[in-house]
Image (tube, helix red, strand yellow):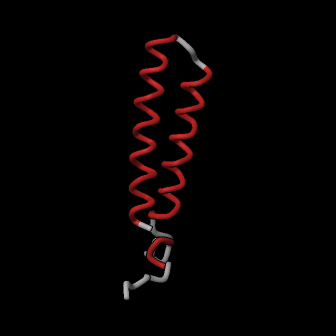
Amino acid sequence: MNLVLSIMMLAAGALVLGAFALWRRTGQRKQPLLMLLLALIAVINVAIWTVPDSSGTAPVDKLPTETAD
């Protein structure tokens, strides 16, 4: 699960950089804003999984761990 969350954060960063580059090159507004919105949603999703609740445990810590055979 940590790998998935890491990839989501990298994708969010790439979306922000791509949105800025698209805005600077073409002057479009709609597409870069949608890219920024998607990046924000990805960051919020990662935060939901990693921020601890009132008991001090994060939802990602409650997942069962898989062991390799």
In the rendered image, the vertical position of residue 11 relative to residue 18, given as above or below? below
In the rendered image, the vertical position of residue 19 relative to residue 5, given as above or below? above
The residue at the point 39 percent across, 62 percent down is 3
The residue at the point 59 percent across, 24 percent down is 31
The quarter of the picture where the C terminus appears is bottom left
The quarter of the picture where the N terminus appears is bottom left
The residue at the point 45 percent across, 64 percent down is 50
Count all numbered tags in the image, as a single digit: 0
Viewer-side residue, 24 vs 45:
24
Give the image quarter of residue 45: bottom right
Residue 37 spot, x, y in % from top left: 57, 36
The residue positioned farthest toward the bottom in the image shown: 69
Residue 56 spot, x, y in % from top left: 43, 75
Viewer-side residue, 60 vs 10:
10
Residue 25 spot, x, y in % from top left: 45, 12
Viewer-side residue, 20 vs 26:
26
The residue at the point 47 percent across, 20 percent down is 22
Residue 39 spot, x, y in % from top left: 51, 40
In the rendered image, the vertical position of residue 48 relative to residue 9, given as above or below? below
In the rendered image, the vertical position of residue 8 relative to residue 26, given as above or below? below
